[in-house]
Image: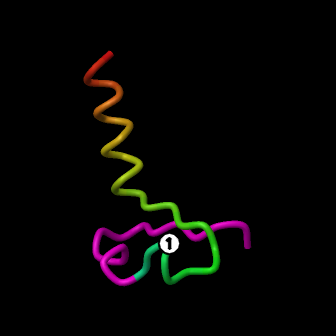
Amino acid sequence: CDAVVLGCTEIPLLVNQENSSLPILDSTRLLARAALKEATR
């Protein structure tokens, strides 16, 4: 496994990069960043 996708909005409250040995991909954060990037284009 190369990374962990946190696909539920509550999971990042319990699991984060500090307590995981694998890279974390927070889907909510990624979506928010993409929406902001698109909105400011």
Quarter of the image for residue 7 reads: bottom left
- Location of residue 17 with respect to 36 vertically, above or below: below
Quarter of the image for residue 10 reads: bottom left
Position of 19 with respect to 2 (left or right) is left
Position of 26 with respect to 24 (left or right) is left
**Of the residues shown, which amino acid type is indicated by label 1?**
Gln
Residue 39: x and y in percent read 26, 24
Task: Give the residues drawn in magenta, as a range.
Answer: 1-14
- Residue at image point 35% right, 28% down: 37
- Residue at image point 27% right, 20% down: 40
- Location of residue 36 with respect to 39 vertically, above or below: below
Q: Looking at this view, is 16 or 32 the one in front? A: 16
Across the whole image, how many numbered discs are drawn on residues? Answer: 1
Q: Secondary structure at mark 1?
A: helix
Residue 31: x and y in percent read 36, 46
Q: Residue furthest front?
A: 18
| Quadrant of the drawing holding the C terminus | top left
- Residue at image point 36% right, 73% down: 12
Asked if residue 4 lies in the magenta stretch, the reply is yes
Give the residue at mark 1. Answer: 17
Residue 30: x and y in percent read 41, 49
Q: Residue furthest right?
A: 1
- Residue at image point 55% right, 80% down: 20
Asked if residue 32 lies in the magenta stretch, the reply is no
